[in-house]
Amino acid sequence: MNQDIKHEETVTKVLEALESIRPFLNRDGGDIELVDIEGDTVKVKLQGNCSGCPMNFSTMKLGVENTIKQYAPEIKEVISVN
């Protein structure tokens, strides 16, 4: 399969995962943005109340990363960038 098509499919799956998470983040006054996908690593940016929240590490690992991996098993890691 063409690499560009495979990348686009991964982007679509990651965006779907983020949409499924977004209502929970919005409820706490936060949001999330997809910054980039490099290989099997997704870079996201937590926004609003989520960016400074002391719980954002567990939100990233337990919530965001696990959900993205369910939608896109090819993803190995999700990291937060500022």
Image: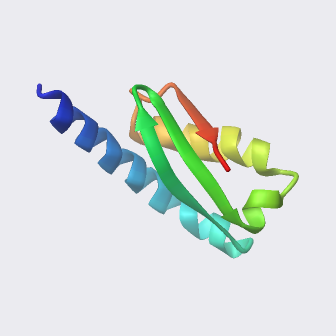
Left or right: 19 as drawn, with respect to 29: left
Q: Residue at x 58, y 69 (%)?
A: 23
Across the whole image, how many numbered discs are drawn on residues?
Answer: 0
Left or right: 5 as drawn, with respect to 16: left
- Outermost residue on the right side: it is 54
Position in image of residue 21 (x %, y %)? 55, 58
To which quarter of the image does residue 78 belong?
Answer: top right
Visual colour scheme: rainbow
> In the rendered image of this protein, does residue 40 appear above or below residue 36?
above
Position in image of residue 52 (x %, y %)? 82, 59
- Outermost residue on the left side: it is 1
Q: Residue at x 25, y 42 (%)?
A: 9
Foreground residue among 39 and 68: 39
Q: Residue at x 45, y 51 (%)?
A: 17
Q: Residue at x 83, y 58 (%)?
A: 53
Foreground residue among 65 and 6: 6
To which quarter of the image does residue 31 belong?
Answer: bottom right
Position in image of residue 25 (x %, y %)? 66, 65
- Outermost residue on the front side: it is 82
> In the rendered image of this protein, does residue 53 appear above or below residue 76?
below
> In the rendered image of this protein, does residue 56 appear above or below residue 73?
below
Left or right: 48 as drawn, with respect to 69: right
Q: Quadrant of the N terminus?
A: top left
Position in image of residue 55 (x %, y %)? 83, 51
